[in-house]
Image (cartoon, coloured by chain):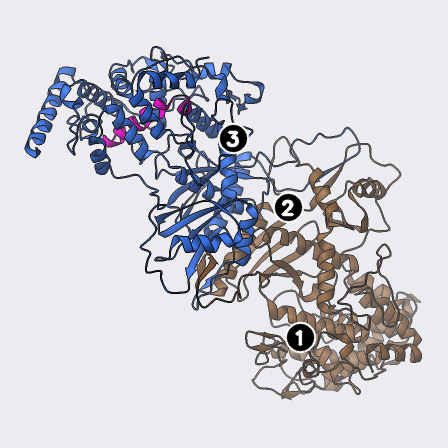
Chain colours: A brown, B blue
Amino acid sequence: MASSSTVCRLHMRGRGRLTTCLQRVDTFLGRSFGTNVVADQSETPRKDEAEEKDGRKSFYAVQAERQEQAERSVLFSCPSRTSERKILKYLSRHGEIKKHFSYESYGMYAVAEFENRESVDSILEGAAIPTASHESTVPFKSRLLSVRNLGPADSSNQQSSKHDQSQTTIPINELMKRLSREGSVTQQITSLTEAYQLTDENIRLRFLVCSLLRDIAAAYFPECTIKPFGSSVNGFGKLGCDLDMFLDLDSISGRNIKTPKSGLLLEYQMKRTNSERAVTQSILSVIGTCVDQFGPGCVGVQKILNARCPLVRFAHQPSGFQCDLTANNRVAMKSSELLYIYGQLDPRVRCLVFTVRCWARAHGITSSIPGAWISNFSLTVMVLFFLQRRNPPIIPTLDHLRDLAGPADKCVIEGNDCTFVSDFSKIQLQSNTETLEQLLCEFFEFYATFTFTKSSINIRKGKEQNKPEVAPLHIQNPFETSLNVSKNVNVTQLERFVALCQESSWLLQQTETLTPTGGPTPWGLTTLLLPSQIAGIKSRKKRGREAASERIKGLLESLKNKNQQKS
Amino acid sequence: MASSSTVCRLHMRGRGRLTTCLQRVDTFLGRSFGTNVVADQSETPRKDEAEEKDGRKSFYAVQAERQEQAERSVLFSCPSRTSERKILKYLSRHGEIKKHFSYESYGMYAVAEFENRESVDSILEGAAIPTASHESTVPFKSRLLSVRNLGPADSSNQQSSKHDQSQTTIPINELMKRLSREGSVTQQITSLTEAYQLTDENIRLRFLVCSLLRDIAAAYFPECTIKPFGSSVNGFGKLGCDLDMFLDLDSISGRNIKTPKSGLLLEYQMKRTNSERAVTQSILSVIGTCVDQFGPGCVGVQKILNARCPLVRFAHQPSGFQCDLTANNRVAMKSSELLYIYGQLDPRVRCLVFTVRCWARAHGITSSIPGAWISNFSLTVMVLFFLQRRNPPIIPTLDHLRDLAGPADKCVIEGNDCTFVSDFSKIQLQSNTETLEQLLCEFFEFYATFTFTKSSINIRKGKEQNKPEVAPLHIQNPFETSLNVSKNVNVTQLERFVALCQESSWLLQQTETLTPTGGPTPWGLTTLLLPSQIAGIKSRKKRGREAASERIKGLLESLKNKNQQKS
């Protein structure tokens, strides 16, 4: 069985340094390949029945575990100059704290996860409703609390440090300094991934915010859940990314009750509308109103109910997350699961995606503003496709994952087949041993020469297909296969992407680029993140490769000159 | 001790017929004076610890009991032509049904009160979410259900009848026919009260609607209650009257937690506003949105949040009630309790109030439209004041009730003293033995000659006071004593009231009026409900008593002529 652990063993045998690098980044699940790394020292590993035989948990097992952790957690603001130990001691009167961490947002905040949910109830029972002389409070109680210190400040304590986790990415300049100190491009890629990926704490915080919001929605729909999807859970989320959530009402019972042939039947009386969409709009409207009027720390609530996918957008200040709540967004969830599986199959997948996305953002290929830019999702699919096209392939095709699916994996959403295997142990990988450096270089080369004019990128088949329709960039939607996920991209943007791939591919073949400087001077990956000389390309006219290369040579010269001046 | 039971014994000794009449009407609590009448045969009387020594329960004990009954109840629409027995048998699979009744609203509806709350949970667990091909449903589950009959209709059954209770008052014409058949004015008054007063079933339905609404509000405020106030609970409500409710958030814990001198304190983070009013508006706004979007059977939702007392108004179709929901309306609750106590002290109080209110409505003295009309509440206070002014008084003054209050009765709301006794056994009554006929006649006489120009009606003192301000009609607000509850009444309306009192007083002194006809021909009280000859008075010029009397004589003549024609 050539499962991913086989790949790991290969790594460990052949390329010890890479393995070490990858171990560093692969903490997404608190698991590294081949070795058992417990990310959270204060947590005793628990055998989960959904845990797969090879040690990797299915997407749903991870989701369920995170959700359950969140329900046992409280979020609270901490007074400044009060020792963390004192606060923890105070809270632990209500029960054993299993995990805790603090962070800076609008003030200092902390999360405490208790061993038992009863401790949370006990805390809430004793909590006070704040009173202020010129203000009134809406007495909606939640698990968002404030700790107030009524005594003198603890002079010994200047803010806790050990547990004070950053919840945002480091600025690009700082990242580039850090990368320049690494010893190889592969190490640089690993270091970038480490710096950018969501931390265990940040993921906990995301699930906690969902859980707090669920408390609001569960008021009316006790059987509902609110699930994070997209970058928060697919393994490719960057610190600081938006929190996309959806309200899952599918678990509400009473929908599929078998109607007897005769006799009596009891039915709920319920408001009726003429479409599922109207139901979604109605529910999101009410939840939006509640979040706006009652939700502590929730500001800037916007109800965007006439969008194709109706949503409620708001900022959750205590966590610092920008939140988008939708309803019944099941395809998005399957999409998240698919990316998660690909990310977990081989650690190089996530590293390459993080690196390409960072590179794309540095050059304005992607943007946070909607427009003709290539989206992060499109870029991720392009990386996956590239990895499927390696020889031997690093990851299997979606069709292959569908063929491996068991009966429980069967999933059809609105007529689209979203079936694929969820059990990692069923997936056998081929033993590709390329390094991240090689893969990055090959990625740029691959798309620098890709026949975008004719071909469609298709991760379902793992092979380019003829374009079914005219569009500068055609990437088949993996589930709604008649759709192009990059329909928005125009020729200019595609040309910029291709030109930058050419430039970066060329740069990675230059000895100057590949020589570690050991200091703050850019080299390797860092060079690729510097402003490009060709970034200004706007015309649709294709420029010859030589012309671009000339400009890149000029760039390299100027780099070398700078380095010489500094040294 | 001259408690009300002393009065009762007096009634029973001296005026057997009156006592019988009063026993008929005094089923408000399922208790009659002196005798134990169980209104609901299917219900085993339970000893309530709040039940007073003399058999009458305090206002709060009644409220709590009704509320608890409502929580064990479900409301459901019944299919036509399905036997009630079949439905009851079907429902009783979930537990013992303690009480049930059906009624006609928008279709047939029924209420089932279970012995235990668990039965309700069991019913809900098995209920289906309705599905229809061209409709979608908002899956908000409540205790409002539909029974569907999937088999053939029960041919034997033409709608249940025994339990089919009317939830609206009979039309005035029908009432007058019924009254004309009675043997005395006192019996007429009793009969009118019986026809108009809320039935036990109607009161249950009101508490059930509150309880259903509470399920919505409790979503966010688990400790809240929704309490009916005003005519639904004060003993003076007429079938079909609006359902006034208020959301009581006072029981939310965490408000008065003692702040320690040092150490840490945990507080909820909550939305803040600059006033209690803004909090009320915010909460009612959210509940209004929920009722509108999720509440089955709730239609025509209006948020009237800028009113002096912000409210949400809606029609609850399954019960047929027009509902007004306010928040934290504590003075209104004390006012309801005060009326309840007066109504319970002597059965003649409620009879006289119902009669005077029916008479006033027949002559357009009161109206459902806001304006310069005398309100039902003002009219009730006028009756109470009149009864305080009898010799000996039938009911004590509010100041006396305040003096009897125990420490637990102490109540100050927004600086106003709302303290009065709640324990009936502490109230001693004087033995006034006037009949209802006498009292009605004296009432008209009293207000026909009352010095409205100088005097204020004051039930706190039980004596007219000098008017503190210029207003045609001045009735002191019993709790906010600087306010006039009839500030809206203009001279024209007051003059009409006085003229009609004069007319009715005169009519009740005529032998023709007081002779029972035994048939459909109006006599006694019925005569007073006929259109008045003087109802058109609009001018402010006072007319001499003689002139009015002349017109009344003409009216009586015409009545006699009619009677002769008919017989």
> Can you see residue B22?
yes
What chain is tagged by disc 2?
A
Determine if the magenta segment contains residue A424.
no
Q: Distance between the residues labelled 2 and 1?
A: 39 Å
| Residue located at (61% from left, 72% from top) | A372
Provide residue A202's location: percent of width, then percent of height: 75, 58
Determine if the magenta segment contains residue B359.
yes
What chain is tagged by disc 3?
B
| Residue located at (66% from left, 77% from top) | A407
Residue A409 image label: 1
Image: magenta residue range: B342-365
* Disc on the earlier residue, 2 or 1: 2
Q: Distance between the residues labelled 3 and 2?
A: 37 Å
The reply to the same-chain question for discs 2 and 1 is yes
Q: Which of B345 and A546 is in front in this view?
A: B345
**Element on which disc 3 rests:** helix
The reply to the same-chain question for discs 3 and 2 is no
The crowding category of the residue bearing disc 1, from other C-alpha atoms within 10 Å (few below 14, some 14 to 19, many at least 20), is some
Q: Tell me the residue that label 2 is attached to.
A: A296
Q: Which amino acid does label 1 sit on?
A: Asp
Q: Distance between the residues labelled 1 and 3?
A: 57 Å
Q: Tell me the residue that label 3 is attached to.
A: B61
Provide residue B75's location: percent of width, then percent of height: 45, 49
- Would residue A297 be found to the left or right of residue A147 on screen? left
Asked if labels 2 and 3 touch by Cβ distance under 8 angstroms, the answer is: no
Q: Which of A437 and B273 is in front in this view?
A: B273
Q: What residue type is labelled 3?
A: Ala
Q: Which of A352 and B358 is in front in this view?
A: B358
A437 w.r.t. A315: above or below: below
Quadrant location of the N terminus of chain A in the rendered image: bottom right
